[in-house]
Image (spheres, rainbow, N blue to C red):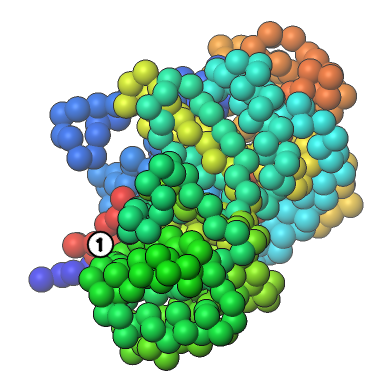
């Protein structure tokens, strides 16, 4: 039985192009503030449908076209737009229409007989010029309120919008935002200092019964995944604490019970220890070990790992971490002012970032982001509520996306929005192309058409005449941009009709990368039983 089908040359490129075009048409209706929606069958509930207005969600839900060769092109574009979304939180539909039009124009040049290598070199030249033009238009974010328009999809009150933006400004472009569901109907955010984890209190009897919230000042910290049940496990630690006059102890362990618990209670009763609190090590398995090692780096201690054959009986005072303060409740704890070495913390941050980059599903990515937030020591906690579970899921995704986009804007700066910056880049290509070789002039013409495609689509989605708007944009941008909501031309900076530079650069870089791949594709192979994945 044949397990693969093979196509060559233009017979291979044509279905790739068709698949990309189909996928771009699927996402294009969502582009712009007056975009449309897409109705799609739910993956896990055949017969049930959902109405989607976000290009990223539509891309995630669509992972197979009927024709296998066209599907290859669609999945190439799907992967490309998802990379832009994960990097910037935005730009999904823009990348889709830009890349699809660029591939279509380059395909015409291939059919006309131009060499792929010459086209690829000219494409590199055009990318350099486009990115240089975009950067020349950008300005730094001087007023965080300039980004208020990006939060419009959340329909927040002015007070909530200001609160969100001010917290993001305080956090900075490299900070971590954790978004969690809330039973409330609104969105609440809080800038959190220190290392916070949800974890149950193991031995409430060690604390005064009247305390709803406990606090240890300058404690030493024991970190382990062991079940601590024998007195022999704790004796060396308690003796070391007595020698060094340590009277406050914080224990993070798999469990605390039996003789070990009784020994701690006895030391408290005799006044040898002044305060003791014990909490369960967060999470389970490998993730639990990673968290314990993160806590060890943050506090300057050492995680005593059961699976590694390490024993609590061998612990010395130098293995215990320390912090300015540890606070908690029955279900959470926080470490403030951990005394870990910066180099050790940076090493753990690098490992968590590598795990985030290699994560294969959303749960793994979320766990890695949580660890990064705590390792940075400051993060923005956003709790998202809504009237229905469906609305809450939508708002959770939207908050994560918009927070990342705002951080990208803080880091890279802003430039005129509404497709105007791409129009300026298209005009720059026309001015520069007069002195180029025939191949370069042909590619520059193709790129100019592709750069105007996002503006054309945005205007068409709003029900306006894209030809008229595009022609004028080439003449007046970036001094004026077209506001599709108000149906008028406005000054972008005063109207705050702006785009983050990082989003547009990511769209260009990804589209050009996909175009280079397309130009060099000569053979397409389809396997009868291909592996498929819901992940982009």
The residue at the far front in this view is 270
Q: Is residue 117 above or below residue 129?
A: below
Q: Residue at x 37, y 58 (%)?
A: 206
Mark 1 falls on what kind of element? loop
Q: Residues within 10 Å of mark 1 (few under 14, many from 20)?
A: few
| Residue at (67, 36) in percent of width and height | 167
Q: Is residue 142 above or below residue 105?
A: above
Residue drawn at x 24%, y 34% is 42
- Answer above or below: position of 260 versus 56: below
- Of 76 and 276, nearer the camera is 276
Q: Between residues 447 and 399, which one lies in front from this camera angle?
A: 399
497 relative to 401 in the view: left or right: right
Residue on which disc 1 sits: 531
Which image quarter: residue 418? top right
Residue farthest along the left direction in this orientation: 1
The image shows residue 168 at horizontal and vertical percentages of 67, 39
Count the marks: how many?
1
């Amino acid at each position: 039985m044949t397990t693969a089908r093979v196509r060559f040359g233009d017979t291979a490129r044509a279905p790739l192009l068709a698949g990309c075009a189909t996928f771009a048409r699927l996402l294009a209706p969502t582009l712009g503030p007056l975009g449309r929606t897409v109705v799609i069958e739910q993956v896990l509930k055949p017969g049930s449908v959902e109405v989607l207005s976000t290009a990223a969600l539509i891309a995630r839900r669509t992972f197979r076209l009927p024709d296998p060769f066209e599907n290859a092109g669609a999945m190439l574009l799907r992967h490309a737009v998802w990379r832009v979304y994960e990097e910037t939180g935005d730009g999904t539909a823009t990348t889709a229409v830009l890349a699809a039009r660029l591939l279509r124009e380059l395909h015409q040049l291939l059919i006309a007989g131009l060499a792929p290598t010459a086209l690829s070199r000219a494409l590199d030249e055009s990318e350099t010029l486009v990115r240089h033009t975009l950067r020349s238009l950008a300005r730094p974010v001087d007023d965080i309120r300039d980004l208020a328009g990006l939060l419009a999809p959340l329909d927040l009150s002015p007070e909530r919008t200001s609160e969100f933006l001010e917290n993001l400004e305080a956090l900075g472009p490299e900070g971590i935002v954790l978004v969690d569901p809330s039973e409330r109907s609104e969105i609440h955010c809080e800038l959190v200092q220190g290392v916070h984890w949800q974890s149950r209190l193991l031995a409430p009897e060690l604390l005064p019964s009247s305390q709803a919230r406990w606090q240890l000042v300058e404690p030493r910290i024991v970190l382990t995944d062991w079940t601590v049940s024998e007195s022999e496990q704790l004796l060396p630690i308690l003796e070391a604490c007595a020698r060094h006059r340590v009277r406050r102890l914080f224990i993070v362990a798999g469990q605390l019970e039996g003789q070990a618990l009784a020994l701690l209670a006895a030391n408290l009763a005799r006044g040898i220890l002044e305060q003791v609190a014990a909490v369960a090590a967060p999470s389970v398995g490998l993730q639990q070990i990673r968290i314990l090692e993160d806590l060890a780096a943050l506090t300057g201690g050492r995680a005593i790992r059961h699976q590694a054959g390490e024993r609590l009986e061998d612990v010395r005072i130098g293995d215990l971490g320390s912090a300015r303060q540890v606070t908690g409740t029955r279900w959470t704890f926080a470490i403030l002012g951990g005394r870990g070495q910066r180099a050790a913390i940076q090493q753990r941050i690098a490992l968590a970032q590598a795990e985030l980059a290699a994560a294969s599903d959303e749960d793994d990515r979320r766990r890695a982001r949580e660890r990064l937030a705590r390792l940075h020591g400051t993060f923005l906690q956003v709790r998202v509520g809504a009237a229905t579970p469906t609305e809450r899921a939508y708002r959770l995704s939207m908050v994560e996306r918009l927070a990342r986009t705002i951080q990208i804007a803080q880091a890279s700066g802003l430039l005129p929005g509404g497709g105007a910056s791409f129009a300026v880049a298209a005009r720059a290509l026309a001015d520069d192309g007069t002195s180029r070789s025939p191949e370069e002039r042909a590619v520059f013409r193709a790129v100019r058409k592709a750069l105007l495609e996002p503006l054309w689509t945005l205007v068409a989605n709003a029900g306006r005449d894209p030809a008229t708007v595009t022609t004028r944009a080439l003449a007046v941008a970036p001094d004026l941009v077209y506001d599709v909501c108000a149906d008028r031309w406005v000054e972008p900076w005063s109207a705050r009709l702006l785009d983050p530079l990082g989003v547009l650069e990511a769209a260009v870089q990804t589209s050009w990368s996909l175009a280079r791949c397309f130009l060099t594709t000569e053979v397409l192979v389809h396997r009868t039983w291909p592996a498929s994945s819901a992940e982009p």
